[in-house]
Amino acid sequence: MISTKRRVFLKGTLAAGTVGVAVGAGLLAPSKLLAAWPADMMQAEGLDSAMQAALGSADVPDGDIQLSAPEIAENGAVVPVSVETGMSDVTEMAIFVELNNNPLTSRYVLASGTHPTVSTRIRMGESSNVIAAVKSGGNWYKTVQEVKVTVGGCGG
């Protein structure tokens, strides 16, 4: 039993060391290891430009979307948010915070047949509207909820 754990540990150490040497030698770049990062979406400043980059339009109609977020968040660094919809043929979801420097907090591509639900924690710099967008049948729809962020967690 001890020798099995030792072998697993040594194999893991050897694999990590090999990858580290390859990265250090320039044979593997982190960008080759990670998925492409959509900088135009994630670095867009202002809600309209972020929605334009992520959704293709800043003019998105309201839809049948349930956005669950606290009315008052005592810690803007970890605000729990859930998005769910009963719409059919949902392929993507996105969450924006209107007054953040970079409003797009996250964007999800859903596999076919997936129940359209997403739960995450987002960062909010100040009290703002949280916008959830859902792509259903090739069209984007949104809903909005205001979340107040308290200073110092005092609830007021």
Image (cartoon, rainbow, N blue to C red):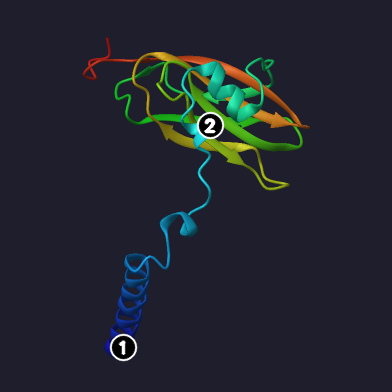
Q: Nearer the viewer, residue 13 or 35?
A: 35
Residue depicted at x 42% and y 21%: 70
Amino acid under disc 2? Met
Q: Nearer the viewer, residue 145 or 61?
A: 61
The image position of residue 147, as x and y in percent, is 42, 16
Residue depicted at x 66% and y 15%: 59
Q: Residue furthest top?
A: 156
The image position of residue 136, as x and y in percent, is 73, 31
The image position of residue 81, as x and y in percent, is 47, 29
- Relative horizontal placement of residue 40, taking residue 18 as reference (left or right): right
Label 2 neighbourhood size at 10 Å, few (<14), some (14-19), many (20+)? many
Residue depicted at x 34% and y 69%: 25
Q: Residue furthest front?
A: 26
Residue depicted at x 35% and y 81%: 11
Q: Nearer the viewer, mark 2 or mark 1?
A: 2
Mark 2 = which residue? 41
Q: CA distance from mark 2 to mark 1?
A: 50 Å
- Relative horizontal placement of residue 23, taking residue 110 as reference (left or right): left
